[in-house]
């Protein structure tokens, strides 16, 4: 369930004109920018960008980049991009970091639907004139390369059908590999990179039922020393506000006994905080 509150009767031209007033002259009116863009869905934001360019022969994204700064600018920049463009940018940043953020590549690959991942790969190719698979392979080696290239190039079955006996068999296979710390086992990589999400959930449930521990915890411990993610807060809120942020908020509260909105308010400030809270459906 999405947290974004967007009107159904917005005017792209009126929004573009209001944004131009907000960035005109000395200093930007950040409150006005948040009030408009923080309440527009992806289609509406694209329409606003087009209207702004037609009215002022200027790229709205570049104008906002020049007017805003810090975490707020970075969050707004990522928000206003089309989803596939944004995911392509995030993947490229993850691969260009001195400490490559492998977790983010896994996250993008596994959270995206097959069509979303295909669109991401196309956007990456258009933006960087290289394939995502090529850049992942260049920046990894060994079994990690096999796993990540497999994940980003996958086009999984997206339906709800589950093979229960297969789930049990592959849960046992994963347990054997994990018990022997054989994380680069070809069958482990095959299962994780080709099975549908519903089939994997069934497999992971079998694993937890039979062995008393969630496989996600095992795998997280195995990858604990690989990379860090300092930009998770912005990324999760910006990328999930139009999808399932309400569900994420519920899970966060269940695990931490703290509302995500309160955690965000404690860790952020100023326009950055106001913008993130707006995307979460909370007005200041």
Image (cartoon, helix red, strand yellow):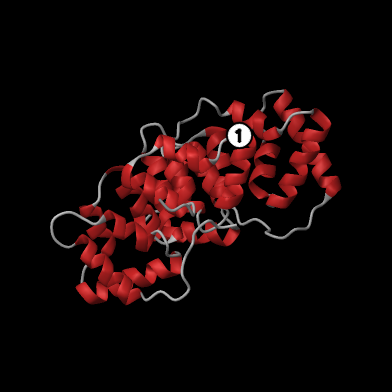
Looking at this view, is 261 or 127 the one in front?
261
| Label 1 crowd bin: few (<14), some (14–19), many (20+), radius 10 Å | few
Residue at the (58%, 51%) spot, across then down:
246
Where does residue 90 sit, x and y in percent of width and height?
Answer: 41, 48
Above/below status of 273 relative to 179:
below
Above/below status of 222 relative to 273:
above
Where does residue 112 sit, x and y in percent of width and height?
Answer: 56, 54
Q: Quadrant of the N terminus?
A: bottom right
For this view, does 157 lie left or right of residue 280? right
Q: How many marks?
A: 1
Residue at the (55%, 51%) spot, across then down:
245
Label 1 secondary element: loop
Where does residue 45 sit, x and y in percent of width and height?
Answer: 39, 66
Looking at this view, is 123 or 90 the one in front?
90
Residue at the (45%, 54%) spot, across then down:
279
For this view, does 139 lie left or right of residue 248? left
The answer to which quarter of the image holds residue 71 is top left
- What residue does disc 1 label? 257
The answer to which quarter of the image holds residue 94 is top left
Above/below status of 54 relative to 160:
below
């Amino acid at each position: 369930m999405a947290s974004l509150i967007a009107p159904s009767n917005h005017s792209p031209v009126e929004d573009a004109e209001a944004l131009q007033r907000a960035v005109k002259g000395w200093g930007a009116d950040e409150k006005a920018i948040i009030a408009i863009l923080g309440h527009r869905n992806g289609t509406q934001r694209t329409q606003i960008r087009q209207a702004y360019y037609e009215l002022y022969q200027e790229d709205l994204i570049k104008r906002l980049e020049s007017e805003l700064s810090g975490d707020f600018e970075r969050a707004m920049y990522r928000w206003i991009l089309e989803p596939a463009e944004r995911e392509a940018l995030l993947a490229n940043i993850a691969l260009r970091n001195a400490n490559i953020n492998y977790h983010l590549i896994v996250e993008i690959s596994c959270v995206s639907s097959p069509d979303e991942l295909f669109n991401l790969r196309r956007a990456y190719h258009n933006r960087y004139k290289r394939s995502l698979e090529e850049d992942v392979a260049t920046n990894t080696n060994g079994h990690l390369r096999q796993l990540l290239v497999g994940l980003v190039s996958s086009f999984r079955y997206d339906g709800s059908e589950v093979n229960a006996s297969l789930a049990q068999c592959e849960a046992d296979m994963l347990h054997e590999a994990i018990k022997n710390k054989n994380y680069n086992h070809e069958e482990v990589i095959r299962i994780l990179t080709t099975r549908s999400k519903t089939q994997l959930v069934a497999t992971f449930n079998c694993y937890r039922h039979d062995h008393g521990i969630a496989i996600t915890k095992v795998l997280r411990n195995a990858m604990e020393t690989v990379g860090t993610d300092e930009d998770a807060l912005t990324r999760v809120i910006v990328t999930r506000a139009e999808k399932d942020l309400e569900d994420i908020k519920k899970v966060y509260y269940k695990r931490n006994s703290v509302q995500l909105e309160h955690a965000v308010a404690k860790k952020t400030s100023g326009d950055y905080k106001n913008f993130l809270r707006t995307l979460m459906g909370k007005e200041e």
